[in-house]
Amino acid sequence: MHFGDERGREAAELQGGDPRTPPSNSFDACFEPNPDSIEMTPYNIDHVAIAVHDLDEAIQRHRQLFGAEPLWREVVAEQGVEEAMIPIGGSFVQLLAPLSGDTPVGRFLTKYGEGLHHIAYAVPDIAAALQDLRSEGARLVDETARTGGRGAKIAFVHPAAFAGTLIELVELPDE
C-alpha cells in the first residue's frame, strides 16, 4: 500500500491540501466553531509520536512497510530528540529518537521500550488552550508554551489528566 495512491489524494483534497505538506494553520478552514466553544477545541490531530531507539532503522522499516517518506527530519536539542515527520493523510507520524538516555524520550524507552509516546492536537491558540485546561484542573507538564519541531509552539498535558495518555498541544506557526 502506498499513501500517494488515489485514496490518499482524495483524502488530502477533502482536507484541503496535499498529503506531502503540513496541514494549514487556518482554524476556520478546518472547523466551524460553536460560538460557545472554548479556545481549547483542537482542529486536527497534528501527529502521533512513536519513540524509537534508532531513527534511521525506524524510517527504513516504516518506508518498507507503508511506503511513506519523511517530509523532514530535524534535531530538537531543547527536547533532547531527533525527529522525522511522515505525512499520513492530513496528519503525521512522528518518529522520535533520543539524543541520549538522560532525556524524557530516552527514559521512556528505558522504562517502556519502543512504541506510542504521545498524541498531539493542533490548537488555534496554545496560550488560551493551556488556560482552559488549567481552569478545568488538568495537570500540565508545561505551564507555558515552548518551541518544538517545525518552529511550532508546543506544550504537554500530563498523562494523569486523561486516560494515562501524554497529550501534546501544537500551535503551528503562521505560513
Image (spheres, rainbow, N blue to C red):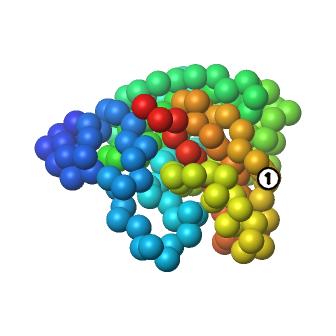
Relative to 134, does residue 61 appear above or below in the rendering?
Answer: above
Q: Quadrant of residue 141?
A: bottom right
- Which residue position holds label 1? 143
Q: Which residue occupies 77% across, 59% down?
A: 140
Relative to 46, 131 lies left or right = right
Res. 80 in view: yes
Q: Dot 1 surroundings within 10 Å: few (below 14), some, or many (20 or more)?
A: some
Front residue of 3 and 27: 27
Q: Quadrant of residue 65?
A: top left
Q: Position of residue 109 (x, y in %)?
A: 73, 43
Amino acid type of disc 1?
A: Glu
Q: Position of residue 159 (x, y in %)?
A: 73, 63
Relative to 124, does residue 93 appear above or below in the rendering?
Answer: above
Relative to 153, does residue 175 appear above or below in the rendering?
Answer: above
Q: Position of residue 23 (x, y in %)?
A: 38, 42
Res. 166 in view: no
For the C terminus, the quadrant is top left
For the N terminus, the quadrant is top left
Front residue of 30 and 67: 30
Q: Which residue occupies 66% across, 62% down?
A: 165
Relative to 38, 26 lies left or right = left
Q: Which residue occupies 52% across, 35% down?
A: 173
Total numbered circles? 1
Relative to 58, does residue 9 appear above or below in the rendering?
Answer: below
The residue positioned farthest toward the right in the image shown: 102
Q: Which residue occupies 14% across, 44% down?
A: 6
The secondary element bearing badge 1 is classed as loop
The residue positioned farthest toward the front in the image shown: 35
Q: Position of residue 108 (x, y in %)?
A: 76, 46
Q: Quadrant of residue 17?
A: top left
Front residue of 36 and 21: 36
